[in-house]
Amino acid sequence: MRIIFTGARRGELVEIGRIVKPQGVKGELKVLPLAGAPLDFSGLEELFLLPASGGPPLAYPLLAVRSQGGALVIRLAGVDDRNQAEALRDRVVALAAGELPPLAPDDIYWHQLAGLAAYTAEGRKVGLVTDFMLTAAHPLLVIVDEQHREYLVPVHPEFMALRHDHEGESAWLLLTPPPGLLGEG
């Protein structure tokens, strides 16, 4: 299982990046994707910007997008000069969850894991997935139990698998970590 890091889900929107600065003088914006690599925005017609103050998201038609190093440069309708672009610095960029590109069969978006219950092969509930950490060695899932203890579980197919109920509607994680990782023994 490979996790593609998206930000938090806010209703029907998923955070995908942050505006880091204006690009040029014609209103273009430089976006640093949360995924670490630019997502494919081809075919997207609309992006949402989340105000820092926590107000409602603002929809902007997407006019153009191009890759630049590890970032994206986007052009939004109604943002026509550097001053307008500067006013959008540090805004979170989101898109409708249904607009995320399809993934390979063993991949999953982070927002799909957040809040899932995690169980051992013996059926013991470990807790809920609350966070995701990128480390130099490998990514980790943060799982918090009912006593508020945190467990850091390496994201590795040997240690975890995504499972679904009989109807395929609700998902959960099956954990098979090395002995001692979950505090047992």
Image (cartoon, rainbow, N blue to C red):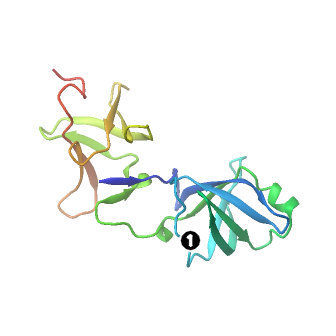
Q: Is residue 88 above or below residue 184?
A: below
Front residue (pair 137, 122) = 137
Front residue (pair 170, 61) = 61
Q: Residue at x 42, y 52 (%)?
A: 110
Residue 60 rendering spot, x and y as whole percentages: 70, 70
Q: Is residue 71 above or below residue 139?
A: below
Residue 37 rendering spot, x and y as whole percentages: 52, 57
Instruction: Tell me the residue that label 1 is attached to.
Output: 41
Residue 8 rendering spot, x and y as whole percentages: 51, 50
Q: Is residue 53 above or below residue 41?
A: above
Seen as rendered, the residue at the extreme top is 185
* 70 to the left or right of 54: left
Residue 178 falls in image quadrant: top left
Amino acid at the residue labelled 1: Phe
Residue 16 rendering spot, x and y as whole percentages: 56, 57
* 42 to the left or right of 54: left
Q: Residue at x 37, y 50 (%)?
A: 113
Residue 62 falls in image quadrant: bottom right
Q: How many marks?
A: 1
Query: Element at badge 1?
Result: loop
Residue 149 falls in image quadrant: top left
Q: Residue at x 85, y 65 (%)?
A: 25
